[in-house]
Amino acid sequence: MPLRLAIGTSDFRKLRESGAYYIDKTSFIREILDAPAEVILLPRPRRFGKTMNLSMLRAYLERREPGDDDLAPLFAGLSIASADPEVRAHQQRYPVVHLNLKGVKASTFDDACKALGRVLAVELERHAPLVLADPRLLPTERHRYEALMASAGAPVDLWDALALLTRLLHRATRERALVLIDEYDVPLQAGFTHGYLDEVTGLMRNLLTGGLKDNPHLFRGVLTGVLRVAREGIFSGPRRPFLSIGTPWRRCSPGVAQGSPCHTARRALLAPRSARGAPGPRSLGATSGLLRTGRSSARRSSQPAGR
């Protein structure tokens, strides 16, 4: 049966089981394991495979519970299958917290909190059989966990959700947790567009700081999005950011041909919001001073139109 192109597929398991074309990017797993930083932000343009890479990380590193399918065959024939034993020792070992914030975009801060609470509740429910069956679970922890699953409470109750979940998973499995957060910047873009940027920035800062900064229950944290941090952002602790920003997406050279893959990628990063008349990543960074894309807006604006 000939291989086919998988259009719009972002799930690693689904793509591999369908027999579609797959460009081997499993060396990314080794890079994450070898990285000196525990928390890594990978800013990339849209349609650059960010969601697929996080799905691949999860498939390789997430521990399997009794009755779960063995996902090791998905990596047969890929470069990671011939990795050193030190790398393969990490396979299917860690509890994984996987959040996709693409749906956390609302016109009000209250609605954004509710949307974020639902995303967290889905992940809490997924881990509930393991966490709630732990005989060491305290009554207060059970109450907090069940309240978060029910999405009940004020925005302040979301602040320690990641910290609570990673702690309980570490205790139940005796392995530190891997935290994957896709499209971390969507709530911030919505907050900027609808006028509640300060409130949502505070919420995201407290949520991520609690779960990712100096967390003894964290194995690795990997975040993806279009925007990267500048100055005082959601990843800033009292003195300095607590994460490593991966190699930023490099701007195309001035002579790049229109319609080339690099040209298309840059247009995908900059065009969608401005085409709709809404503020894009460039105006968000220039206005708020909190976020920016991989290059400064001043340097980007110096490029000729259409390049």
Image (tube, rainbow, N blue to C red):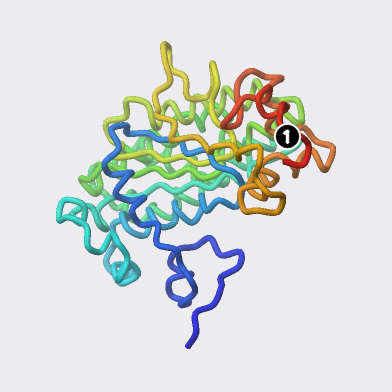
Residue at position x 38%, y 55% in the image:
58
Q: Is residue 75 above or below residue 62?
A: below
Q: Callout 1 environment at 10 Å: few (<14), some (14 to 19), or many (20+)?
A: some
Task: State the residue position of label 1.
Answer: 280
Image height of 172 relative to 59, above or below: above
Q: Quadrant of residue 4?
A: bottom right
Which residue does the image show at 72% across and 41% down from the upper left?
307
Task: Find residue 224 and report its horizontal and vertical position in percent.
Answer: 50, 41
Give the residue at x 25% y 47%. Answer: 172
As rendered, which of 146 and 286 lies closer to the eye? 286
Judged from this view, the residue extending furthest toward the left is 85
Which residue is painted at 43% across and 26% down in the image? 209
Q: Along the horizontal axis of the image, is 68 left or right of 285? A: left
Q: Is residue 215 left or right of residue 118?
A: left
Counting from the top left corner in percent of width and height, residue 227 is at: 59, 34
The image quarter containing residue 211 is top left
- Counting from the top left corner in percent of width and height, residue 117 is at 56, 41
Please, which residue is most extreme toward the right here? 277
